[in-house]
Amino acid sequence: MGLIDFHTHWFSRTYFETLAAQSPLAGTVDDKLAGIVAATGLELPPADHEQHRARWMRELDRHEVEHIVAFGSVPEETPIVAAAAAASAGRISAMALVNPLVAGVPAKVDELLNKGAIKGVLLFPALHRYAIDSEAARALYAVLDAHAAIAYVHCGLFVVKVRDLLGLPRSHDLALANPLHLVAAANGARRATFVVPHFGAGFLRETLMAGAQCQNIVVDTSSSNSWMDTQCPPVDLPTVYRSVLACFGPQRIVFGSDSNVFPAGWRADRAQAHRQALQAAGADAGTQQAVFRENARRLLKLA
């Protein structure tokens, strides 16, 4: 069975340098990057973006991963991940992180989609502090709707260790991270696909309700899913899958690993954990094929 990973972060050197430049901590950008490496053990990507792409292609080959969706995780990374996708012989689909409050964003996204540089966008309403169904967001959704493109809308808990290590403030507002607010957006842009990552990252019930209301809302399975610790009563991954399968059906669930840095590389351990959880939830072979490959192929319009 082939595998498509619907949720990875490209995390180029530009990503780390951009966050380090925003950091209020004392020291140069290089000093701050050295602190991140010392604290986490991660390997900083090379400054040569082609070397970074080549390493990821070898990693995908090693794990027999057919295709990945890769996010630019700061706006400055968009041309880098788009270039990586263009050079990948069809094995990478690029997504751009955008903030619809920034002037000109809908037009820029329209341009990128027209060029085929990206397949859609990644949105962080809680981080950028706008309502999911706000007027500014709706202007962007109209562009995505016209292209039948994809919007990943991050909902629920949001913790990025690198941001914490750099002293960047946790300014996100969870009141703006409720998946129920996607219902109006999805109903207003029915040709677009709205993806809720991480099973809603703590808003599981709300994600299920949104998915039951709108057929163009999809859920992805990415990350360690540590958000399960916040649920009362407690849940495990097979239980989550049973609920999501009941509300979304097997055609609107996509596997994502949330892979992002080396030396961890592509997270085969997460793929294995999700395969086991799906089996424990009673998923047959056709459902597993849909979650791990076929749904992604359809949404990404892969040949």
Image (cartoon, helix red, strand yellow):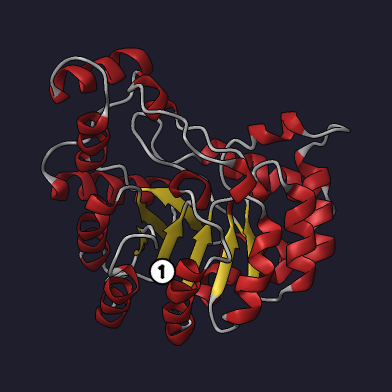
Residue lying farthest to the right in this orientation: 233
Task: State which quarter of the image contains the C terminus.
Answer: bottom left
Q: In the picture provided, is 37 more to the left or to the right than 224?
A: left
Give me the residue at 31% from left, 67% from top: 105
Mark 1, residue position:
120
Q: Nearer the viewer, residue 51 or 116?
A: 116
Residue 13 found in image quarter: top left
Can you say which quadrant of the picture contains the N terminus? bottom right
Q: Residue 141: x percent and y percent?
A: 48, 74
Where does the image place residue 33, in percent across and percent down from the top left?
22, 23
Identify whether 72 is placed above or below 121.
Answer: above
Front one among 281 and 227:
227
**Residue 149 shows up from this direction:** no
Image position of 166 with respect to 65: above or below = above
Q: Is residue 221 left or right of residue 92?
A: right
Residue at the image point whose x is 23% and y is 29% from the top: 20
> Residue 67, relative to residue 128: is it above or below?
below
Mark 1 crowd level (few <14, some 14–19, many ≥20, 10 Å Cα): many
Residue drawn 20% across and 62% down?
A: 83
Q: Secondary structure at mark 1?
A: strand
The residue furthest front is 135
Q: Position of residue 44 (x, y in %)?
A: 24, 30
Q: Residue furthest bottom?
A: 146
Instruction: Classify residue 120 by image quadrant.
Output: bottom left
Please count the marks in the image.
Answer: 1
Question: What is the x, y in percent for residue 90?
Answer: 32, 70
Q: Amino acid at mark 1?
A: Gly
Of the pair 226 and 109, the residue shown nearer to us: 109
> Is residue 160 in view from this perspective?
yes
